[in-house]
Image: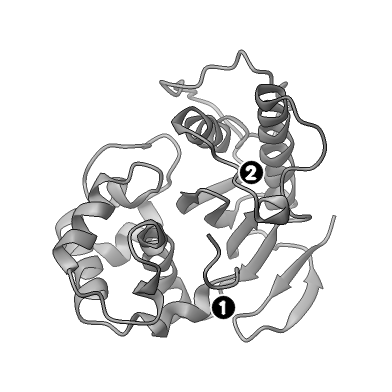
Amino acid sequence: MEVGLPSYTGQMIRIKPATGEIYHVYNRGVEKRDVFMDDRDRNRFVFNLFWFNDDSPIFNNNRLMEVGLPSIDERNRLIEILAFALMPNHYHLMLKQSVDGGITEFMRKVGTGYTNYFNTKYQRVGPLFQGKFKAALIKEERHFVCLPYYIHLNPLDLLDKRWRTQYISDTKQAQRFLDSYKWSSHLDYAGLTNFPEVVSKELLSEFFLNPAQYKKDIFNWISEANLSEIAEFSLEPTNEL
């Protein structure tokens, strides 16, 4: 299955994700509906990010463990999850493809598994997400360096949507909010164990150097940078919520 890969300038091309390349992957709920209603849903989706990252067929049912991710020593991973964030009606993933077809297969398993769970829990039928996932190839080093910050800053929409186009007035409040938001990989890079089995930190840690440097850098983003500069890394319309 081919997936649309828009560049950050908006050009749409049709290619298959390439092994070894890094992509910004995004999808939202159909008709912009919320796809995460409570922490149990969010925990289930994060669990699926771990559970389905394997080339073996895995039957997903509603009795799968939803807390306490298992430790599996030998896995043939489809992708590496470098960063992620969950929002009420969409998600962002930064993925590196490990095997041919890995991203497409991984996203198929995650989307189907979570939709089955959600539809069963809430007694609904039909698609949950808005068509095929969107993905953008990370071509330039500045995209690679800035994208994790964009993904980790996304939850600020829940605090103040103006963060994308204006300077943040209360930077300490913004920092406290991010440090309290469990449903992203921010805490793992900030040195707090959150979802260590899900996130592959090695590649990005070469740029962040250590948790202290990462926390300093992301604080600089929200206190000094013009955040409109990273709006180009978004695959979704602004004011999504």
In the foreground, 239 or 180: 239
* Amino acid identity at mark 1: Lys
Left or right: residue 91 compared with residue 182: right
Up/down of 123 relative to 182, above or below: above
Q: Kindly report the distance in space between the C-alpha atoms of the residues bearing marks 1 and 2.
A: 21 Å
Residue lying at 64% horizontally and 17% vertically, measured from the top left: 62
In the foreground, 195 or 37: 37
**Rendered location of residue 236, percent (x, y):** 60, 68
Left or right: residue 3 compared with residue 166: right
In the foreground, 234 or 77: 234
Local crowd size for mark 2, using a 10 Å CA cut-off: few (<14), some (14–19), many (≥20): many
- Say which element carries label 2: loop
Colour scheme used in the picture? one colour
In the foreground, 34 or 181: 34
- Disc 1 or 2, which lies upstream in sequence? 2
Local crowd size for mark 1, using a 10 Å CA cut-off: few (<14), some (14–19), many (≥20): few
The residue tagged 1 is 139
**Rendered location of residue 3, percent (x, y):** 78, 62
* Amino acid identity at mark 2: Leu
Left or right: residue 190 compared with residue 37: left
**Rendered location of residue 203, percent (x, y):** 40, 58
Residue lying at 70% horizontally and 24% vertically, measured from the top left: 58
* Mark 1–mark 2 CB contact (< 8 Å): no
Up/down of 24 relative to 66, above or below: below
- Say which element carries label 1: loop
- Quadrant of the rendering where the N terminus is positioned: bottom right
Residue 155 visible (yes or no): yes
The residue tagged 2 is 78
Up/down of 127 relative to 165, above or below: above
Residue lying at 45% horizontally and 72% vertically, measured from the top left: 144
